[in-house]
Image (tube, grey):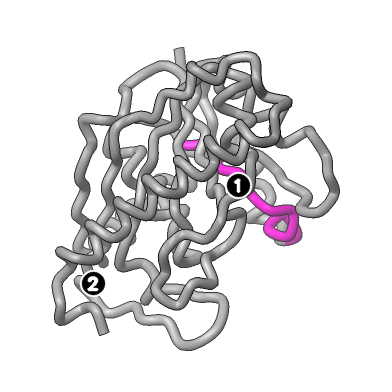
Amino acid sequence: MRRPEPWYRFAVTALRPPVSLWFNWHFEGLENVPREGPLLVACNHISYFDPLAHGLMMLKAGRRPRFFAKQELYGNWLLRNVLEGAKQIKVERGSGSATPVQSAVAALKRGEAVMIYPESTITRNPDHTPMQGKTGVARLTLATEVPVLPVAVWGSQAVWQREGKGSLAFGRPIWLKAGPPLDFSEYEGQQDDSEVLRTITGTVIDELTQLVNDLRARYPKRWSA
């Protein structure tokens, strides 16, 4: 049974209508998203807008997303209350703390949907393909025996970037695609093997790259500039 989370409901009520109506959304692979049970979602990262895009896809699938959120976001009073109230997972980058992973493992064991960006930051590749990933996603799938669901987004790179002018053009297409879950049960018990961790992470990044390339190839050309 879902516990009531007023701040989560506030965020969804405030953000979902304008975000849904302003952009032209296209979702593929919703049948690959389990409707219940633990869910570990690995996403590509091309824009600050991505959590809203990936979160909306999870809502479309009937899931409540839990994101890793960097510590800097907690400096604002309102945002801090929303993130904490919506049970997002706080990350102090560079601290080496195991708390975020432990919190994610606990959430997965409760049957929740945990969202992770394996690159840990917005890609710096000029073509917006995924960079080399960090091994957190591998550690999580091995610690919980939960398959990894790859979900890619395309189109959001024009909306909100770290630098440069973003575009809020009405009707801009935002496309997302979920691939089949990636099962790494063959590596059970090998979470301390660095080579295994790199192999799993590389497989996840390769799958995300394929999804990104597929979306980009079919994306409306007039919006590609």
Residue 186 point in image, percent of width and height: 49, 17
Q: Which mark is residue 82?
A: 1
Residue 171 point in image, percent of width and height: 20, 71
Examine the structure image and report whether residue 73 is included in the region drawn in magenta. Answer: yes
Locate the N terminus and report the quarter of the image it occupies: top left
Secondary structure of the residue carrying tag 1 is helix
Mark 2 surroundings: few (<14), some (14-19) or many (≥20) residues within 10 A: some
Q: Which mark is residue 110?
A: none
Residue at (34% x, 56% y) in the render: 153
Separation of marks 1 and 2 at Cα, in angstroms = 27 Å
Q: Which residue is mark 2?
A: 172
Locate the C terminus and report the quarter of the image it occupies: bottom left
Q: Would you say 33 lies left or right of 49 here?
A: left
- The stretch of residues the image draws in magenta is 65-75
Along the viewing direction, whichever of 107 and 145 lies nearer the viewer: 145
Answer yes or no: do the residues labelled 1 and 2 have beta carbons within 8 Å? no
Q: Depth-wise, is mark 1 or mark 2 nearer the camera?
A: 2
